Image (tube, rainbow, N blue to C red):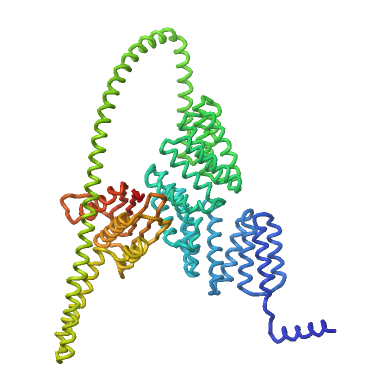
Amino acid sequence: MLKSFLFFISLILVGLGVQSQPDTARINKYFRMSDYWSDKDSAKAVGYINDYFKEAIHDDYYDGVAHFYLAGAYFDFDLARAQQEYMKADELLKNNTTKDAILFRSRAWHNYGVLEQKKDDNKSFVDIQLNKAIPLALQAGDTSRVAWNYKEVGMVFMNFEEFAKAQHYYRTALNLLHLPTADTEVMADCYINIAKAYLLQENVPPARKPLDSAGTLLSTLPNSTYQPAKYLVEAMYHSRTGNWKQALDSLDKGVMLARQYNRSYDESSLLFEKYEIYRKEKKYVEARAILSEVAAFNQRLPLVHNKQLILHELAQTEAALGHMDSAYKWLDQYAQLSDSLSKTGTALQIADLEAKYRSSEKERELLELSNQSKIQRLLLSGGLLLLAAGLLFFLYRSRQRKLQSEQAVRSLQQQQQIEVAGALLNGEERERQRLARELHDGLGGMLAGIKINLSEIASGEGHDSPAMQKIIRQLDSSVKDLRHIAHNLMPESLVRSGLEVALKDLCETLGNGSTKVELQMMNIGDIPKQTQLIIYRIVQELLANVLKHARASEVFVQCSQSENVFYITVEDDGIGIKPSNSSNPSNPSNGIGLENIRHRVEFLKGKLEIDTTPGSGTIVNIEVHVDQR
């Protein structure tokens, strides 16, 4: 009886246009379960969304979210249907101005672009991220998602070997990620790829710093799925510095983790780098075995560019082993994947291999015919070589002794220069302290007293004229300027609160309406006071140069520490530094400011690197030692 009454009441409410609120807990359960099964059992994922539609809620927001998750269910096996569902989601959500709705639209467009990328249309992917997904994420105020999308755009440019653009987008992503709320893994991935871009350009030294930054971030996340990528770039670094054993150790660690996390693409990349090392070492049998594993992966990751590369490398490896039939077979498959221009080049490679093969056959015949004569010539040449080797060894030892003597003299001179530089820096800082005290306590106090006396005279004797007020204001401005000069000579915040607070005050003071100065500090440990002061002077001089010469709108300062090494990066978007020109004294590359920075860096046994292009900004990387000695 009660059930019948409740049913009757519900019919009356529906007839009056009164609808009950949707059961959000049950709806969200449908969505969560569909998302969970989307990459495990597509049929189950679709089933949960169909269960939602059976309830006939008729709410644009929930319907839009349902189509978003339905697209995820079709993502891996029906690209056209998945893209259709993402567009339905966007259409239903576009009039909803809540943050959640805007974020779902951003995610829908991002995933739509990923599906375009799966069709080898990278241009559409980049266009969608920059003009759809990123603007919507910005509108929702989700900087982490914006940074993620910029990172993926950087990856596209990496794949097309446009490394400068790739690094720009990775650095843009990093600038959006602020500690302590930043996604540590996304930051680590950006640093990994910045280092990788340097290495792919064979610019090895600058790769060390971002690689160390990635390692520091991932050291707190030993189970991160980004660990295999870090080991890959670490191996690339060791390989390019000739440390083959360390490179192979890093690759083995990366492969083990990639298999553990089921990261097929990472495992394929790690194995290909291992192949490169064996090829450089001319271990062609091992190289071929590794390359065969990579080829098997490519069947599951069907990217045309990768497949062409693998076929080409297989042909070259087989040729190096003398297996010409196999080399022809791989090159023939490579030709079928290439366009007409590539086919022409491949035909030439096949002809070249065939010519080499025939030439080697003839060479073997000639060698067999002239073997006895060759042995006689070798014996005679061997005697002459032994005599020459003895003479060269004598010259070498003499040269080594001379070089060791010169090195000892240079080391002594360098030590003396360091001691002189230290004395000059200490004397300079003591003079700064003395001037700061005299200006603040002496002249500053005198000016303040004159201002007070004038104010009392003006108010007490009725001389409060505009001219008198102007003089008082000028005195007040002079006192402030004097205190500012005294502060620059010896910053009190450095003495009272340490380096981090002093640099923060410096950046806030120097920032203005036309130039934004942003500071990021990471892992700063104990540093001797004298060393803190030198680091402060370096950053102060760098920022002064930017504000005076660069005409920049944004300046990014990053300071970090790894054990006894302190890293400083100052990056601006200004006009860059022109090549050194001794006839132009106004050029900052000729100024005493940069020379002062070099002296301080040398005193701390550090390194200074300047990466600049006229019209494209400047990046200054500094590395100094801060141990207690």
Q: Position of residue 32 (x, y in %)?
A: 65, 64
Q: Is residue 445 visible?
A: yes
Position of residue 448 relative to residue 551, above or below, is: below
Q: Is residue 516 visible?
A: no
Residue at point 63% right, 55% down? 78
The reply, left or right, for residue 253 in relation to residue 237 is right
Res. 492 image quadrant: bottom left
Q: Nearer the viewer, residue 507 or 271?
A: 507
Q: Position of residue 330 (x, y in %)?
A: 54, 33
Residue at point 19% right, 68% down? 439
Extreme residue toward the bottom, this view: 462
* Count of numbered labels shown in the rendering: 0
Q: Position of residue 487 (x, y in %)?
A: 26, 67
Q: Position of residue 114 (x, y in %)?
A: 54, 56
Residue at point 20% right, 59% down? 431
The reply, left or right, for residue 36 in relation to residue 494 is right
Position of residue 502 relative to residue 6, above or below, is: above
Q: Nearer the viewer, residue 432 or 589?
A: 432
